[in-house]
Amino acid sequence: MKAGFVSSPAVAQAMRYSLMRMQSELVAAQKEVSTGRVADMGLALGSRTGEAVSFRRDVERLNGIIDSNGIVSARMTATQDSLTQMTTAAQSFLQTLTASASGDASQNVTRTDARGAVSAFTAILNASLNGEHLFAGINTDVKPVSDFNDPASTAKAAFDAAFLAHFGFAQTAPAAAGITGAQMTNFLTTVVEPTFLGSGWETDWSSASDQGITSRIALNETTRTSVSANESAIRKVMLAAATVSDLFTGDLSVDARKAVVARSIALIGDGIAELSNLQAETGIAQNRITRANERLTMQIDLFERNILDMEAVDPYEASTRVSTLLQQIETSYALTARIQQLSLARFLS
């Protein structure tokens, strides 16, 4: 029979390695207890790891779309509020025009209200959210419309030039008092409206793009999520207010003023109706975003359940393993301390 010798340092070293392994297992077990998922997905799932990773990637992508939809929803809400404010301002101005047509509002009152309407419309159209202009289409970094009340405005200059070219004198010239109602109606319908409701709007008034922002609200669904200042409704209410504001500066005849008011009432009436349609379209887009978020949330829940089925651990088993490892580590500490105290000198003494 052969005798073998084992030194106490060798035993202590073996215990130390065992202790390190148990500490590593304890960390993994505690992670599983706290997260409810396996600590090492590759080790636990093996060939199904790719499937779990794919599910997680899909969840992240869907969450990204939901986050994007939150930004889009904020923009749509602000746009809806702005359209409501514009409709309210247009209706208020329409009341002034109606009073002017019946003789209940003076020329100065009507002109002052028109200037206020122009300023209100301009401020609303140039509103921004998070540094992006709401009514600029895809040109979100530029102000959509110029201020017609500004003497340096290109729109004001173009309007004055059109009047001068048609009549041969300025709005404020004494000769303006001789303009008849028929002549004014002809100027408005054959010069002003074709110009400023046509290409002249984008040349002199607007820096917005006709193309609106299109947002992806789901994996396979997109929708238009902006309103451009180039919409017909906006052109009409702006032109109605600007026409009265500009032409009422001069000493027009009564018939000419009536022609301006009558045409402006028609324009702003059409504009208010079309603004309602824009509000309805914006509301439909908002509802689509809400429904898309609901569907995305359901898909995320489904993916997360599949992930949980693959990665979930039994919480009771994990807790038991933690308790067992703690006891083993404490026992290992105690044994290591005892072994380290062993020595031949102490034994002989």
Image (cartoon, helix red, strand yellow):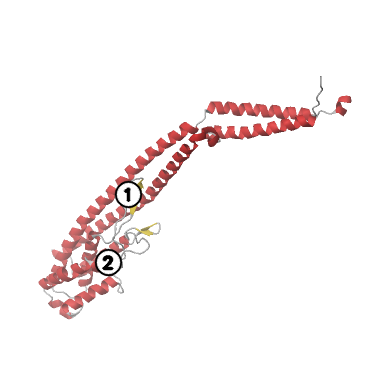
Q: 180 left or right of 160?
A: left
Q: Which residue is mark 1?
A: 222
- SS state under label 2: helix
**Toward the viewer: 317 or 250?**
317
Residue pictured at 20% horizontal, 62% vertical: 96
Label annotation for residue 269: none
Residue pictured at 16% horizontal, 62% vertical: 266
Amino acid carrying mark 2 in the image: Glu
Badge 2, how many Cα within 10 Å: few under 14, some, many 20+? Answer: some
The quarter of the picture where the N terminus appears is top right
Looking at the image, which residue sits at the far front? 1
Where does the image place residue 202, in percent across and percent down from the top left? 27, 66
- SS state under label 1: strand
Q: 244 left or right of 47?
A: left
Report how far apart the C-alphas of labels 2 and 1 lie in the structure.
Answer: 27 Å
Q: Is 253 located above or below residue 118 in the figure? A: below
Where does the image place residue 275, in percent across and percent down from the top left? 23, 56
Q: Is 63 located above or below residue 308 in the figure? A: below
The quarter of the picture where the C terminus appears is top right
Looking at the image, which residue sits at the far right? 349
